[in-house]
Amino acid sequence: MMNEQQKKGIKNTLLDATATNLGVAGVVAGLTDQHNTLFLDHSGKRDITKDDEIQNDAVFSILSCSKAITTTIALQQYEQGLLDLDAPAQEYVPELGEIRVLAGFDRHDQPILNKPKTQMTTRMLLLHTAGFGYEFLDQPYAKLIASQGYSSALTAAKAALNVPLLFEPGTQWSYGINIDWAGVVTEAVGKKDLSQLMQEQIFQPLGMNDTSFILTDSMHQRLATMHHRTETGELFANPDFILPQDPEVFMGGHGLYSTVEDYLKFIRLWLNRGNVNGQQLLKASTVELAFKNGLSANLSVGALNTVNPALTTDINLFPDVKKGWSLGFMTNEQALATGRPAHSLSWAGLANLYYWIDLHNNIGGFWATQTLPFFDAAAVSNYINFEMAVYKALNS
């Protein structure tokens, strides 16, 4: 447990984050060990244009923090012998066999598409080496949307998944819609939609009652408003930013809503090596597999450059540290200056939500805002201050 002085030091980072309009509108942050929530607190407003103070039970669009939950479903199917991670993914979803590699554009700006020489696997999807990207990070996709009528991933339309690969499967690492496709694979294997699989296999066993693709009335009443940073550095509220509530596809890569407390329950699943309340939701051996960097020696997680500054800035998380990708998470192969040890797990959501899972100290944290663009300087610096305060408190 943490004493009040330790909690105060962490709380001060939240107060600092929301002290001015050049920070974030509102933040909820939490810390857990294997058994209990050690810290859960908030600061700021749910909507910067209103007087409502954000509360600990605020609901967030967690965006890419959804990815680890989708991956967990795939890992459950893997250990049950239902899903072969190294079989061609088209064996489960034949449409994946129709995906082509984008070789470029001809003089009429039509895409040049070639059949891939290697069949992608579900493991490649989970590791982000299958060849897919994102339209806000990869210019070819932005061009296809602008000139060819392709759909954005944020539409939750099935057509949004039918984009070409940016490279031959298995040859590079590229962050993209890989986990959305992995979710479709799990639906084919489980013979249920992804929302139902998550409810039955993760949310209900863990007591994650405020996590869903579709907002309940209660969740909607507690929803934190999305905010955008202007060129002058100030924030404006955009209450119309809500992910599709009648999705054609449950987008396992970004579609979930949740609370910080719910996500800490998910983190505890990993801290407990798959065992929660006596239920073994994942075998310890599967968890150990997912803890390890799964990229080959010639691949690593590098910088990501934006092609849509309204959604994300250029991204380079902990630039001086070698990073890998496991079956579910980014791994830091070296210790971080925040105090986070090497071989921890982490990732983030587009609206500047960040979490980490420290397997050495058996703690995990989640810092949540609704602030665009991603990797906003004020947001990420305040998150890092939070993480540093956590380790300072633990070591005091």
Image (cartoon, rainbow, N blue to C red):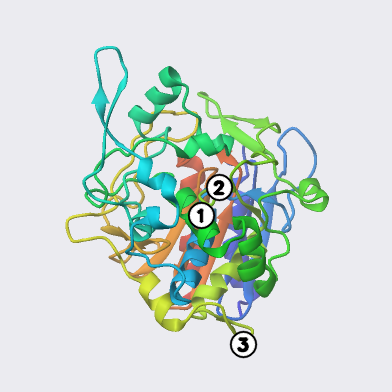
Residue farthest along the left direction in this orientation: 298
Q: Is residue 343 left or right of residue 349?
A: left
Q: Residue at x 22, y 54 (%)?
A: 299
Instruction: Find disc 2 in the rendering and name its residue.
Output: 251
Element on which disc 2 rests:
loop
Location of residue 147 by image quarter:
top left
Location of residue 103 by image quarter:
top left
Q: Is residue 268 left or right of residue 298?
A: right
The mark lying in front, picked from 3 and 1, is 1
Q: Residue 183: which disc?
A: 1
Q: Residue at x 59, y 50 (%)?
A: 62
Q: Are marks 3 and 1 in contact (CB under 8 Å)?
A: no
Is tag 2's residue or tag 3's residue first in the polypeptide sequence?
2
Instruction: Find disc 3 in the rendering and name its residue.
Output: 278
**Viewer-proximal residue among 149 and 26:** 149
- Amino acid type of disc 2? Met
| Position in image of residue 174 (x %, y %) | 32, 45
**Viewer-proximal residue among 72 and 269:** 72
- Amino acid type of disc 1? Gly
| Position in image of residue 244 (x %, y %) | 66, 38
Q: Is residue 10 left or right of residue 181?
A: right
Q: Residue at x 42, y 33 (%)?
A: 135
